[in-house]
Amino acid sequence: MEPSVGLRTIPMKKASLTYWAAISAFLALASCEKPKSAVQTSPPEVLVTEVVQKEVPEIRQWVGTLSGFENADVKARTTGYLLRRAYQQGGYVKTGDLLFEIDPRPFQATLDQAKGQLQEAKATMLGVELDAKRAKELFEGKVISEQEYTNKTQLYQTKVAAVTAAQAAVEEAQLNLDYTKVVSPLDGIAGQAQAQIGDLVGTGSNTTLTTVSQIEPILVYFPISEQTYWEFADRLKEIMAVAEDKRPEKVELILPDGSVYPHKGKFDFVDRQVDPKTGTIQIAVSFPNPELTLRPGQYATARAEIGRIPNALVIPQEAVSEMQGGNQVGVVGSDGKAEIRAVKLGPVYGHSIVVTEGLKAGEKVIVEGFQKIRQGIEVSAKPYTETPKSEGSKETSEKKPTSGES
């Protein structure tokens, strides 16, 4: 029977050839892929430097507040109406310069009255004095009785006392009149006026008229922890035992912009007690301020060398990584393999830090590339070159800031 018209039959031989051609192409492509195990990776590159052993200064720095060497609250010592302000607010004044004037007229009137009463008392005393002298002569001549002589003498002594009281009233009135001129008690910067013209001063909130601060020299107050105080109590005692004018000026002042103040200061005093609320004790350092650029209330950092550390092991600060509350460094051994090692740190020295445990002199620590390494991995070590930093970040030394310390 012949096949139906319109149907096509594919020959078996041709279909087999197509199938085997597809299989061959797949195998050829598969053979081009390389196994993952055959991919070669180069060791990670890290920058290393040697652990240096040397003597380093132990330097501490503390954040403090500037204050006037003397701060005088200028108060009205008598009650009256403010007549005028005679100084430039924020300007420099000298001892005795007029700052304020209180209306003097009532006080002048009181003084005039007291002077009149004094003259009257003196005149009365003069008359009684003559009577007392005559009574004495009459009593000696047995002309008058002892009682009459005693009365005359007592009257004279009463009038003498009245003159003394009148003289004191004059002096008091003069003093109150002088107090109407409020003057500066010291050389320094006079602050903003706390009272306006026409205010009744000398009572209530208007007792203090302004504040004058002596800022040459100027003090920097900073707190240190009780623990830190005990560490350096002997050294502080030695410094305080030296006369103030002979103490060495070795304390630097770092300003808020990072620059170092051109004049060095010296320790001025250690407070008498530890503050029970904060557990800190106040230290004060005095700095020359000839240009009057430093002002009370400013924040600054005091920095001082308090000792020397012999044979200290020093590495760059960048080499230290903090992991889970501890400090670690990467070390490259002589075999070129990396080791992650826990270390204990000491004070900061410049841009480096002292290591007290965990390293030896001459070992190579990883400064850059710590995140690339694992324990025992082979690395490609290159020498590290320190980048110069600004002058303001000069040598500092403190493990961690505590209660104003850094």
Image (cartoon, helix red, strand yellow):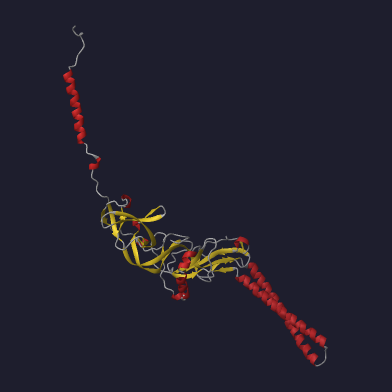
Q: Give the side of residue 177 with respect to residue 40, left or right.
A: right
Q: Quadrant of residue 136?
A: bottom right
Quadrant of the rendering where the N terminus is positioned: top left
**Does the rendering let one see residue 152?**
yes
Above or below residue 350? Residue 132 is below
Residue 374 location (% of width, % of height): 32, 50
Residue 255, horizontal then vertical, whole percent:
41, 62
Residue at left 31%, top 50%?
A: 372
- The image quadrant where one finds the C terminus is bottom left
Q: Is 341 situated above or below 184?
A: above
Nearer-the-camera pick, 60 or 150: 60
Nearer to me, 3 or 200: 3
Residue 268: x and y in percent read: 47, 70
Taking the view exactly as shown, the residue that stands out farthest to the bottom is 141
Q: Position of residue 329 (x, y in %)?
A: 34, 56
Q: Residue at x 35, y 58 (%)?
A: 317
Q: Decide if residue 21 is on the left or right side of residue 340.
A: left
Vertically, is 166 above or below 379?
below
Q: Is residue 66 visible?
A: no
269 or 212: nearer the eye? 269
8 and 3: which one is in front?
Answer: 3
